[in-house]
Image (cartoon, grey):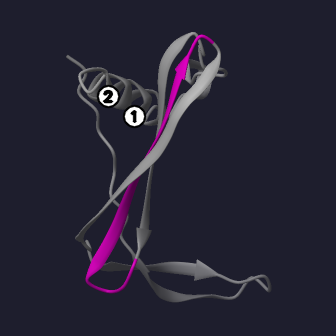
Amino acid sequence: MKIFLPFGFALILLLSACDNNDDQAKTVDKNGSIEVSLSTAHLDSLKDLVTTHYIVWRKGVKIKEFAKTDTVPSLGKFYTEGENDNGDTKSVDVKKDYEFFVTVK
């Protein structure tokens, strides 16, 4: 089963990284698949949290669900123009986000 995790993980990442949502999966084949979702969260100014959530399906039944988390160094901040509800703009600092790239072999 461990050998299928990287392939399922890579496939889901590849589909979720597309800017064109036409290729995005609408449903999951629950007869035998691994559903994977990735997310990041900013813990503090030095660390970000990466979470990988897995759902394993077999014959239409969810047989296992688990998540793996890890911390990675923060990418820092950048300055950009921000606008409030009143239309006022000002320069604000925003934390940089990681991008996900997937290689499927």
Kind of residue at badge 2:
Leu
Judged from the image, the secondary structure of the residue bearing numbered disc 2 is: helix
- Which image quadrant is residue 87 in? bottom right
Query: Which residue is painted at 34% across and 51% down in the image?
Result: 99
> Tag count in the figure?
2
- Give the alpha-carbon distance from disc 1 to disc 2, as whole Å: 12 Å
Give the answer, above or below, for where 62 lies relative to 30: below
Quadrant for the C terminus, please: top left
Region rendered in magenta: 43-59
The stretch drawn in magenta includes residue 73? no
Query: Which residue is painted at 33% across and 71% down in the image?
Result: 48
Disc assigned to residue 70: none
Judged from the image, the secondary structure of the residue bearing numbered disc 1 is: helix
- Image location of residue 73, percent across then percent down: 21, 72
Q: Is residue 9 left or right of residue 103?
A: right
Quadrant for the N terminus, please: top left
Query: Which residue is painted at 46% across and 31% down in the image?
Result: 18
Q: Which residue lies under the disc numbered 2?
A: 5
Query: Which residue is painted at 23% across and 27% down in the image?
Result: 103
Kind of residue at badge 1:
Leu
- Which image quadrant is residue 46 in? bottom left
Q: Earlier in the sequence, mark 1 or mark 2?
A: 2
- Image location of residue 62, percent across then percent down: 60, 27
Q: Which residue lies under the disc numbered 1?
A: 13
Chief SS of the magenta region: strand
